Image (spheres, rainbow, N blue to C red):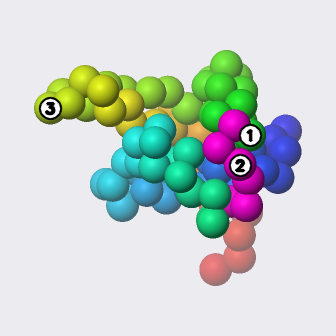
Amino acid sequence: VLESVDQRLLEIIVVQHYLNKPLSAMQLLNSRDVVFLGASTISRKLEGLSRHGWIESKTDAADRRIKFILPTAKALAYFDRLNALMPE
C-alpha cells in the first residue's frame, strides 16, 4: 500500500508518461509547488518508489546528465486496477 504522498508523486509520473512527456528527476525535485514537499523529501520518496519497484530511471540519449523517471509495469498495472474500480 502506498502512502498518500508516494501515490501523489506516482500519479504525476504516470500521467506524464501517458501524455508522452516524461519528467526528469530535476523536474520532479523542482515540483515543490505541486506536491508541497521539499526537494530532499521528494528525493527520498523517489528512492523509496524505485526501491519498491514503482519507478525506474532512464538516461536521456541526447544528454546523459538527464535522467527521466518512468513508471514500471507494476505502477501502470496498479493504476489500471484503480481505473477499473471507478464508475463510468
Residue furthest to the left: 62
Dot in front, 1 or 3:
1
| Within-10-Å neighbours for mark 1: few <14, some 14–19, many 20+ | few
Image quadrant containing the N terminus: top right
User: Is 25 or 84 nearer to us in this picture?
Assistant: 25
Label 3 vs 2, first from the N-terminus? 2
Question: What is the distance, in whole Å, between disc 3 and disc 2 at their CAs?
Answer: 29 Å
Q: Secondary structure at mark 2?
A: loop
The reply to whether the magenta stretch includes residue 82 is no
Q: Secondary structure at mark 3?
A: loop
Task: Magenta stretch: give its range.
Answer: 35-40
Residue 32 sits in quarter: bottom right
User: Is 16 or 67 nearer to us in this picture?
Assistant: 67
In this figure, which residue is indicated by the disc labeled 2?
38
Where residue 45 sits in the image (x, y, percent)? Answer: 71, 36
Residue at (65, 44) in percent of width and height: 39
Name the mark on residue 62. 3
- Do residues under tags 1 and 2 come within 8 Å of each other at their CB atoms? yes
Residue 76 sits in quarter: top right
Amino acid at pointer 2: Gly
Dot in front, 3 or 2:
2
Position of residue 81 relative to residue 42, above or below, is below
Image quadrant containing the C terminus: bottom right
In this figure, which residue is indicated by the disc labeled 1?
41
Position of residue 34 relative to residue 64, above or below, is below
Residue furthest to the top: 51
Amino acid at pointer 1: Thr
